[in-house]
Image: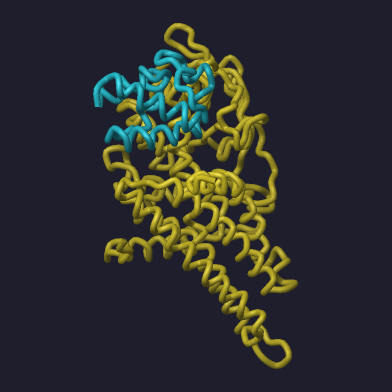
Chain colours: A cyan, B yellow
Amino acid sequence: MNEQTAETAIRKYIVNEIMFKKDESVLGFEESLLERGVLDSMAMVELIAFLEREFSVKVARTDMVPENFDSIQAIAQFIRSR
Amino acid sequence: MDFSLSDEQLSLREGALAFARKELADDLIARDRDGVFPRDLWKRCAGFGVQGLPFPAAYGGQGSDVLTTVLVMEALGCGCKDNGLLFALGAQMWSVQMPINLFGNEEQKKKYLPPLCSGQLIGAHGMSEPGSGSDAFSLSTTAKRDGSSYVLNGAKTFVSNAPVADVFIIFANTDRSKGFMGISAFILDKNTPGLQVGKNIGKLGLRTSPWSEVVMDDCRIPETQRLGKEGNGAAIFEDSMAWERSFILANYVGGMERQLETCINYTKGRKQFGKPISKFQSVANRIVDMKVRLETSRYLLYKVAWMMDRQTPSTLDAAILKLYLSESWVKSCLDATQIHGGYGYTTEYEVERDLRDSVGSTLYSGTSEMQRNLIARHLHL
């Protein structure tokens, strides 16, 4: 999966499955998911399951920090670093 | 799945049962009445190796796998009637030692794990606050960075072991704007200036396990006392809850076995209307239900331990185990009381204490309601 599609796939999942919206433009790649309240602890469990399934990565508990999950861009970079 | 136990595991389980029957029996009726924590028994448990069971030998532990650990906890529950002591042990092992083992740096592991394993130190875990329980991440306690220090302010409540603890894991907000990822975990020593431990809070059961409030008033600690990265607190808490949810009730499987044996012996010995009351179907049915709950709880426990040993933890299975085992324990305690009739209601027969102790199991480490929520989420409800 190329860099742009990682961001796109993550945004599509978050907008559709966590925010329950259809228009993906409601969420920017650099927007803070935590400050906007998009990502809470319940949603995090689902997001991690998605990332592990979609990108074949293992997300450890020690990875669950803002620098890796505060935005779609941060998540995509974290995935690429694995 | 293969739950056949090795000779070593069987031997250790037998040894733990014998140890508990011999070394952990004292005047529990009086200690329960007075709410006395048994520090001497705590040290005996450490001498047997209980607190160090699942932890690496390099840090003073036994290096046992998870299934072996729960077999020992189960045996202790069968041989020892002090549910409060066993609860206190579990609280330290799963929610203090385990997060230090998994998230601590080398220095923290070397400093804290050996004395926690040896019984020299007692640990407590502070998350719940007066305003946040099941909604754990809405906590108010703050930790403000000040140079190379953090200054903690806030109050924790229902902190198990706190009145006797030497070391505390405390969760606090380091950046409220980041929501649940603005929470960090810290290790505090009891003599840290500004740390105040309240008096034991009286409760229905588990009275030999003290708990209290813990207040941080401008409590300054060096940043080296942070556990894990800044913002990693929620994950650390979730991880320790996964361990606690899975295994803090392991002793109750043994407790149900002990209770079953007691009830069988009692009903065979007590005669009414010219025959042992075990011959009355309404009494026998209760005992059958106790046996079914015991065996089903045991296999759920072993399954979750087996999964943990293979590093395939399952939130769903752990939630099912916690929900089922806690509610089975309460039901079996009620059955045991009913089977003993008026005697079961007396302190002397030591049946009512199990019942009082059991109620908390549906509350701590995530209420039954929260376990049902977790299960419902897995069912996409």
Can residue B367 be seen at all in this image of the molecule? yes
Q: Give the x, y percent position of residue A32.
A: 46, 15
A16 above or below B299?
Answer: above
Total marks in image: 0
Answer left or right for B123 relative to B280: left
Q: Determine the residue located farthest toward the top in the rendered image.
A: B147
Answer left or right for B300 relative to A51: right
B246 above or below B177?
Answer: below
B135 above or below B363?
Answer: above
From the image, which quarter does the N terminus of chain B lie in?
bottom left
Residue at (60% x, 33% y) in the render: B135
Residue at (68% x, 49% y) in the render: B34
Q: Determine the residue located farthest toward the front in the rendered image.
A: A23
B202 above or below B28?
Answer: above
Residue at (52% x, 30% y) in the render: A20
Q: Give the x, y percent position of residue A9.
A: 35, 27
Q: Give the x, y percent position of residue B168.
A: 50, 30
Question: Which quadrant would residue B101 be assigned to in this image?
Answer: top left
